[in-house]
Each structure stands twice: as C-alpha cells, then as structure tokens.
C-alpha cells in the first residue's frame, strides 16, 4: 500500500525557517517524481514544487522561488522541503504527492500544517 | 504561465442529477488535464487523468472530456457522498496549475 506521511509543520515567526519531510513507503520511491502542493486555510490548491526521480529536474512556483528548496534522498525514501524567509501568506497545509509518469499526482499524504505568525 | 479557470464556482443539485463542471486553460494543453475531488479536511483524490481516463477504483458515474483549452467534468448521477470541491489541474513537464475549484453540494 502506497503511503506518504508528512512531518515538520508547526508555528514559525515571519522570516523564520522550517523543513518539511515526507516519508514514502509501499512503492519504489526512486522511480517517481514527487510534488509539494499547499492549501491556505479556506482556499484552493496551489502547486509549490516538483522534483524528478533522480533530482535532475526541479521546478518551483514563482511564489516560493528563491525561498524554498525541494530535495530528496532516495536511499531513505524521503522527500524534503526547506522553507526559508517564511511569510504570513505561506501559512497552509502542505501535501506531498507522488507523480505518476511525471504527469499526474496520484497518491497524496495527509498534509502538515505550517503557520507563519508572530 | 498557464492559467486555469473553472465554472461554476459552486453549485447545488439534487441526488440523481447530472452535474457538469467546465475548466478552461489559457493556452492549448492538449489532454494534459486531471480532475481531483477534495472533501473537507482530507487530501485531494485523483478521479480523472489525461482529460478522460478514469482512475482505478473511481466510480463510473464520474467522467471527463475535452482537449486543447476546453474541458468538462461530469457526474452522471449525483450521490450524497459526492459532496466535495472539485479541481481541474493542468501539467506541463512537472509544472502544475490548479483551477480555483467548484464546490458541489446537495440541494
């Protein structure tokens, strides 16, 4: 069974940093691209970042470019999102998702809440 | 950047009704369009990929069609468990854009 479990969310002050993790199991992690998607309270879904299976291709939404860094460790079946210079508008539930055929996110984690507030 | 629009933003329908949601891309995306269902407090669930392909295990009352810039998502007979927000999503080389969502509830 495919499982994705996010962790690392919490309360952080504006300008602060946080590192999210996503532990994957039930599939060959090294064969899949992965995504981070977020959802601000009461709002829609926003794609944040993607990373290819071998980390050769990495993409970011303009809203996080230069502040967030996506990475993965295939040996540990883990995906990461390093978030720096956090702003109030980064407050959201952050989901990791597996991307099938580099085309559609098919499995999602349960999400981890990041709150940026003083 | 490719922008996605959806209509309507919300709708109310009766159990058994046919429900249709439209999604429009700001440029030709061929069939690179997925549909998701999200219930409150839950992660999104993939329903349709590549515009018209039903994900394994998804009931056949859900369907999708379209290509280019205009796409349609249909629930052929609305059920109480279909109450959710539905999102279209385009993809282009690991870059993704979601539509704003359509909230569906029971009349």
Image: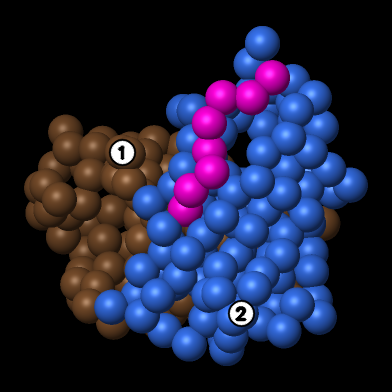
Residue at mark 2 to residue at mark 1: CA–CA distance: 32 Å
Where's residue A28, x and y in %? 48, 87
Q: Residues within 10 Å of mark 2 (few under 14, many from 20)?
A: some
- Is residue A64 shown in magenta? no
Indicate the chain coloured brown by its letter. B
Q: Secondary structure at mark 2?
A: loop
Identified at 60% across, 70% down, the residue is A34
Which is more toward the observer, B18 or A10? Answer: A10
Which is more toward the observer, B46 or B51? Answer: B46
Which is more toward the observer, B12 or B33? Answer: B33
- Is residue A12 shown in magenta? yes
Q: How is the image coloured?
A: by chain
Q: Quadrant of the N terminus of chain A?
A: bottom left
Q: Quadrant of the C terminus of chain A?
A: top right
Q: Secondary structure at mark 1?
A: loop
Q: Is residue B71 visible?
A: no
Indicate the chain coloured blue by its letter. A
Where's residue B50, x and y in %? 52, 79
From the image, give the main secondary structure of the stretch colored magenta.
Answer: strand
Reading the image, the residue beneath label 1 is B40
Q: Which residues are magenta?
A: A6-13
Where's residue A36, x and y in %? 60, 56
Identified at 56% across, 24% down, the residue is A11
Asked whether, in this view, residue B98 is left or right of residue A60, the answer is left
Q: Chain of mark 1?
A: B
Asked whether, in this view, residue A15 is left or right of residue A45, the answer is right
Reading the image, the residue beneath label 2 is A74
């Amino acid at each position: 069974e495919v499982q994705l479990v996010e962790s690392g969310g919490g309360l952080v002050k504006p300008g602060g940093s946080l590192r999210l993790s996503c532990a994957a199991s039930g599939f060959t992690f090294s064969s899949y691209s992965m995504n981070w998607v977020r959802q601000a309270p009461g709002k829609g879904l926003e794609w944040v970042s993607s990373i290819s299976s071998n980390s050769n291709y990495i993409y970011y939404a303009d809203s996080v470019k230069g502040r967030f860094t996506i990475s993965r460790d295939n040996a540990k079946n883990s995906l990461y999102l390093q978030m720096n210079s956090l702003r109030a508008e980064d407050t959201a539930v952050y989901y990791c998702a597996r991307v099938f055929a580099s085309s559609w996110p098919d499995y999602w984690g349960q999400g981890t809440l990041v709150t940026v507030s003083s | 950047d490719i922008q996605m629009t959806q209509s309507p933003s919300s709708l109310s329908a009766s159990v058994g009704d046919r429900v249709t949601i439209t999604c429009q891309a700001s440029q030709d995306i061929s069939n690179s369009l997925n549909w998701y269902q999200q219930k409150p407090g839950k992660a999104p669930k993939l329903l349709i990929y590549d515009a018209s392909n039903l994900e394994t295990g998804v009931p056949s009352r859900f369907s999708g069609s379209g290509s280019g810039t205009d796409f349609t998502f249909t629930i052929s007979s609305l059920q109480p468990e279909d109450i959710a927000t539905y999102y279209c999503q385009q993809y282009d080389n690991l870059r993704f854009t979601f539509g704003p969502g359509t909230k569906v509830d029971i009349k």
